[in-house]
Image (cartoon, rainbow, N blue to C red):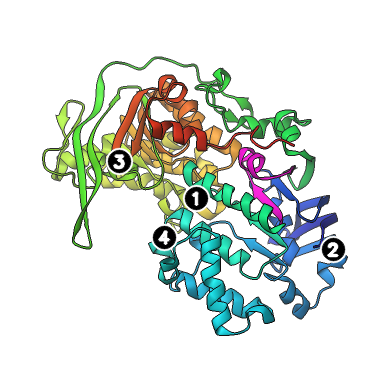
Amino acid sequence: MPDLIFDDVSITYRTSGRSGRDEVAAVRNVSLTLPAGQTLGIAGESGSGKSTLAMSVLRLLPRNARLSGRVLLGDEDVASLSFGQLRAVRWAQTSIVFQGAMHSLNPVRTVGWQLLEALELHASERWKGEKARKERVRELLDIVDLPQQKSESYPHELSGGQKQRVMIAMALACDPEVIIADEPTTALDVIVQKQILDMISRLVAERGISMLMISHDLSVLATACDRIAIMRDGELVEVGESYAVCTSPQEAYTRQLADAFPTIGDPASRMAPVTRHGRGADEVPEITHGDEVLLEARGVNVTYRSGGRPVHAVRDVDLSVRKGEIVALVGQSGSGKSTLARALMGLQPADPGSQIRFDGAPLPSKGRDLARFRSQVQLVLQDPWAALNPKHSVYESVAEGLRVQRFAGDERERVAQSLADAELTPPERYFGAIPQELSGGQRQRVVIAGALAVQPQMLIADEPVASLDASVRGEILGLLLELRRRLGLSALVITHDLGLAWNIAHTVAVMYHGQIVEHGPTEEVLLNPKHEYTRHLLSAAPRIEEKTA
């Protein structure tokens, strides 16, 4: 089994701009070793160079990339391999679990077909025959704890965790010696995340596989890796045993990454998200919310029909949000959180007998009253890429709601004010930008600005930071707290992340199988949980100190 060695590796991208062809340095003079049979995590924010470094192992960099230094698999320099030699290495010796299982799987092919394809293209004599390959597919599904019938399923028929298991099965298909896992748990709920991390750790231990794991979440790497390397702006800033790097970092940047994912019960992180500039406690002073109820749900039920059978997605839910209050609705995927949010917005019909009231009045069912209600309660979607039209400028995206509401005032002034409220300043600088020109955090701010443009009283934010970097996540959470302080906004934040709830919520409601099983002040629910499911969620959350040396 070979060591994986990065020997003084630098990677640049050639770009074309107004001033001619330029080179942008993505990785700078990185030397790093993954010994055979061990696990190494690389942490850093978007743009730090961690994924670029990982993709260089199998020469998967784009054509405009230029690499200097050496990437060695054992004694072999990857750059010197012929295409035939490289193909023999890919998947059979070294494989990759790509980031974003939803986008990495072929949507029009079954799971079994895609596993067979990997075996047909890369497997050795061991699985040469069709019978042997089909038996290997059955074995792979067992290895990653998927039922055999999932072989006939398409990606859209699988949950997020199941899709991630398929990606891991594909990586294991040809029995590799080294696996590269690029953000393998991003956007998964804590229960599924723990299952995936436990499975990866089990497979690495049982099969003696070397693993290079990429993540922006130090707690994930602390759970799964023996050693951790920290990258920033293309440079290696710190490397060491996981426990030492996470608990006694030598660099301030490493400490910032660790602090960005709050420890539940830590008073320093209560109502104080970490941004690029440190904690925001002094910038966003805590104030108490009022007692006046803004949004109230009583006995809400939502029933679907699937295959002729009723599916009870939301069951007899009582929930309220007071003026100036942030409520976190937590639970794993499929618990009914998003369905409840759509029902509260009037986007999903609730069953007869369900009562939803806003500011004392029943939820309108149609017409101008419903349009007026939706201007008062705005939805912030989970994925800013999907929420923004890629062909529309920032100005058009923010102004869209104003035009739907037939705003009669100065549109340009309102758009500028909304962008400023979302901390995109000076706003005129962003008017002509399109989503592809913005970072993930900037795109999420544009989505929030679009919601603020119609001057709502309340935001419903669905997983607002699920796919964002550590410090960017803190900036968005800090923005929500600042909007509450300055504009008096209430918010219902839907999340699977209990740390987020500790960071910004006054009240937590825990949802399980369509029901609210626990509801109360954040400190009470998270520090003294009464329900077994809440305790299960808390125990599943990864912790910085999890894996000792």
Which element is circle 4 on?
loop
Which residue position holds label 2?
Answer: 74
**Of the numbered discs in the image, which one, if any, rests on residue 341?**
3
Residue 544 appears left or right of 56: left
Kind of residue at disc 4: Leu
Amino acid, disc 3: Ala
Q: What residue type is labelled 2?
A: Gly
- Location of residue 27 in the rendering, given as x and y in whole percent from the top left corner: 77, 52
Q: Can residue 189 be seen in this view?
A: no
| Marking on residue 73 | none
Viewer-proximal residue, 422 or 432? 422
Give the answer, above or below, for where 189 lies relative to 265.
below
Q: Which of marks 3 and 1 is in front?
A: 3
Residue 76, percent across and down? Answer: 85, 68
Give the structural element (helix, strand or loop) at label 3: helix
Rendered view: 146 above or below 421? below
> Which stretch did the figure color magenta?
209-230
Q: Mark 1 points at which residue?
A: 432
Q: Name the residue under label 4.
A: 158
Q: Is residue 377 magenta?
A: no
Q: Where is residue 325 in the image (x, y as percent from the top left)?
A: 35, 23
Which numbered disc, 2 or 3, marks the residue closer to the eye? 2
Across and down, in percent, residue 488 comes to: 36, 23
- Sequence-first disc among 2 and 3: 2
Q: Which is nearer the N-term, disc 3 or disc 1? A: 3
Q: In the rendered structure, which disc, 4 or 1, sits on the residue that comes first in sequence?
A: 4
